[in-house]
Image (cartoon, rainbow, N blue to C red):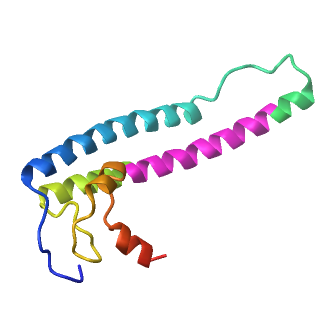
Amino acid sequence: MKKGISKRYSDIELEKFKKLIILKIESAQKDLQLLKDSYSNASSNGTDDTYSSFKSFEEGSETLSKESNTLLASRQEKFIRDLKNALIRIENKTYGICRETGKLIAKDRLKLVPHATLSIEAKSKSK
């Protein structure tokens, strides 16, 4: 942090953010499991009796779908990791403090992006 921390969110506010983040983690883990299931259980809609060019088209489509689901799962894992890091910041009582400016990140921003580490002001400067 570049500037000293002038204030932080109260313990009550931190507890509210903690509950929100825990709910988001639970939801994200369910979504991640669905993604993992979708690319690990190749759909067994057999194409043994269908026209050969359609069969190869379907196999190609299935490969693309697996690749995109793998990418989505990777992003979901990063999201979960970022949320867990936010829980650590809550425990350290540094949650909601911009790592660039040292100012509090707006509550509205944290409700939408609970793992945010930059205020809108700092994020705009970095673009």
| Frontmost residue, 9 versus 62 | 9
Question: Which of these two is toward me, 91 or 68?
Answer: 91
In the figure, 64 relative to 58: above or below? below
Image coordinates of residue 86 in percent, x first then y, are 25, 55
The dominant secondary structure in magenta is helix
Q: Is residue 63 magenta?
A: yes
| Closer to us: 107 or 118 | 107
Residue 42 horizontal side relative to residue 29, left or right: right
Above or below: residue 94 compared with residue 44: below
Query: At x 32% / y 41%, what residue is drawn?
Result: 25
What residue is rendered at 88% in x and 28% in y?
54
Give the farthest residue toward the bottom: 2
Q: Residue, x 63% and y 40% (percent of image)?
A: 66
> Which x, y percent locates residue 102?
22, 75
Q: Quadrant of the N terminus?
A: bottom left
Asked if the magenta segment contains residue 33, the reply would be: no
Taking the spot 67% from the left edge, 39% from the top edge, the residue there is 65
Nearest the camera: 103 or 23? 103
Magenta region, residue range: 58-79
Quarter-of-image position of residue 4: bottom left
* Image quarter of residue 52: top right
